[in-house]
Image (cartoon, grey):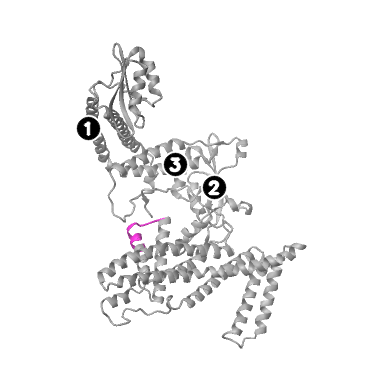
Amino acid sequence: MAIVKMKKLRLMAVRSEKDRLLRELESFGCVEFSELSEELSDEGLVRESSDLLTLRNRQNTILNAIGLLDRYAPEKKPLLSAKPQVETETLLDDSILEGALEKASFINGLEEKIKRLTAEENRQNSLIESVRPWLELDLPLDTAATERSAVLWGSIPARIDLQEVISAVESASDEAELFRVSGDKSTNYVLVVCIREALPEVQESLRRFGFTAVSFTGEQGNAKEAKKRAEDRLAALSGEKESVRNALVEKAPERSDLKLAADVCAAKIARAEAEGKLMGLESTVVMQGWVPAEKEEELASILEGYGCAWETEEPDPSEYPDVPVQLKNNRITDALNMVTNMYSLPAYDGVDPNPLMAPFFILFYGLMMADMGYGLIMMIAALVAMAKIKPRKGTLSFCRLLLYGGISTFIMGALTGGFFGNAPEQIGKILGKPEGWGVLPSLFNPMTDSMLVLIGSMVLGMIHLNTGMVISAVEKVKKGDAASALWEEGSLWVTLVGIILFALNKTVAPAVPAVLGKAILIIGCVMILYGGTRGAKGFGKFTSIFGTLYNTLTGWFGDILSYSRIMALMLAGSVIATVFNTIGGIANNLVFFLIIFLIGHALNFALNLLGCYVHDLRLQCLEYFGKFYKDGGRAFAPLAVNPKYYDTVEN
C-alpha cells in the first residue's frame, strides 16, 4: 500500500450552479477545498459569504433538544446495535431542517420552563429556611414599626454573650428591649423593640456585637403562615414540573427525526465551511483544493455536467508540506491506521508505514499476550462487534486490530501452551485427575525458558530494526542519495556481519576464520567513523569521531535492549495468570476456583490488553519509525457527508 497521490485542483463555476455543485462534490466526498491566495482580491475576486454562524446555532438547538430527550427519556436499545442507515441524498435534503427546528425549539422551551420552575422552587425553599427560626413568634413578618415604636428582626453570633447585648441595648435607651426568639449552635435569632426616636442609638449599640438585620419584604402573616404558603407553592410547582417532564417524555418519538436533522445540519455546515473558502465575481466563483489522482476521472465526469472550467496539476516539491495525506490500505493494513494516527501521519513524500508495520505489530502483540484463552476472547469480541455494530472508519480499524491481535495471541498461546495460564492443569487437580492432566503441549514455556524467550526477543528486535534500515536505505537511493545509504546503513550492516562471523567462530562454527570476522568488523567500524565525520570540518571532524562511536554503541544497545519488554510482558502475563489459578485451587473447590478465576483473569486480561498495546506501540513508534519514518503529514479532509447518528447506505 502507499500514500495516495494528490493533484491540485482549480476550477471556475457559474454562480447559479454553486450550491448544486457543492452538494454534488459533498456526495462525491473526494475534494478538499483550500484557501485561495489573498492576491486574487487584487483581480477583483471577492470572498464568498456563508451563513455558517446561523447554521451552527441551528445545530446547537437541535443537539440540545436531543440531549434533553436522552436525559428525560433515555433511549432503550440493544447493547451492541448498528446505526440506522439512510441514503446520502436524504442527508443533503435541507428541507428536513424546517420541521425539526420547530420541534427542537419546542423541546428546548420545555426545558426553559423546568429551569424557571426550579428557580422558583429554590426561592420557596430559601423562604422556608429563612422563616424557620421565627416559627414560634406570633408576629407578622412585615412588622417593621408601629406608630411609636420600631421593630428590628435579626441574628447575633452564638459566641456573643446575649446578656451583654441586652445590657447594651438597655443602655442605649430605657425604652428598648431585646427578645431571644430561637437559636442554634452558631446563631441566636432576636427581636428588638424600641421607641422610634431611639432607633439610631439602638442600632449603633447592636453593630459592635455582629448584629445582622433580617427582612421579609413582601411577606404577610406570621412565620407559620408564610411557611405553609411556601409548602403549598412547592407542591404546586412539583406538579407543574412533573407535567412538563411528561410533555418532554412524550416527545421521545421525535428523537430519530431530530438526529436525522442534526446530521443534515452537519452536512450543510460542511458545505458552508467550504463555501467560505471560495472567491468569485458577480456571475462566477473560483475554487481551489486537492483531489486524489485516482479520482480525477470521476471528478471530471461530475464537473463536465456543470460546465466548469477546471485544471489539475501535480504538486511542486516545495508544496509537499501543504499537500494532504491519505493512506491507501487493504483489510490488513487498515487495522494499523489507528496506530499511525496516534503517532503522526507520514509526510506526503514519505513512506506509508502501515504495511511495513502490520506484520511486526501483530506478531509482537501476540507474543506479549501469548494465551489461547485471551486470544479467543479478543477474536469473539471483534467478530461480534463487527457483526452487530457494523462499524466503519476508525471503529472498524479498531475491531480489525483486535481481531488480528487475537489471532496472533491465540497462535502464540498455542506455542507456549497457555490457556488462561495453566487453568486446565489446576482444574484437573481439583477434579482429582492424574498428575500432569491438562498440561498442554508447548514449543517453549516463558516460565521455564525465559532466557530463550529473551534471546528470541533480541533477535526479533534486530530483524525489526534492520527492516527499518532497509526501508531507509531504499528511500535514500530513490531520492538519489546513495552515498548516505552506504555510509549510514551500509556501514552498520558491514559491522553487524563482522560481529556475527566473529561470534560464530567463538561458538558454534569454529571453522569460520576468526580473522575474516575481525577484518570485516574493522572495515565496518572505519566506515561508521568516516560516515559520521563526512560533514564535519577542522576540529569538528575530530570531536565527531567520539560522538559517532558513543551514539552508535549506546543507540544500538539501547534499541535492542528495548525489545526485552516482549519477554517481560509475556512472562508477567503468564506468572499473574498462574498465580490466580494457584490461589483458586487452594480450597480444592471448583466453585471457589471459578470465582477467583473470573476475577483474576478479568484483571490480568484488562491490564495486558492495554499494556501490550502501549509497549508494542512504543517499539513501533520509537525504535522502528526512528530508522526511516518521516512524519508531519496533514490528514486529507475532503468535503464529505460525515453523519454522527446515521450511516450512509453503501452502494
Nearest to N terminus: mark 1 or mark 3 = 1
* Residue type, mark 3 in image: Ile
Q: Residue at x 39, y 27 (%)?
A: 210
Query: On the image, numbered disc 1 is attached to which residue?
Result: 235
Q: Secondary structure at mark 2?
A: strand
x then y, percent, for residue 148: 30, 11
Q: Outermost residue, bottom direction?
A: 511
Query: On the image, numbered disc 2 is attached to which residue?
Result: 289
x then y, percent, for residue 208: 41, 24
* Numbered range of the magenta stretch: 382-392
Left/right placement of residue 246 relative to residue 13 reads: left
Front in this rendered view, residue 544 or 137: 137
Front in this rendered view, residue 391 or 604: 604
Name the front one of labels 1 and 3.
Answer: 1
Disc ID at residue 269: 3
Q: Is residue 509 magenta?
A: no
Front in this rendered view, residue 121 or 263: 121
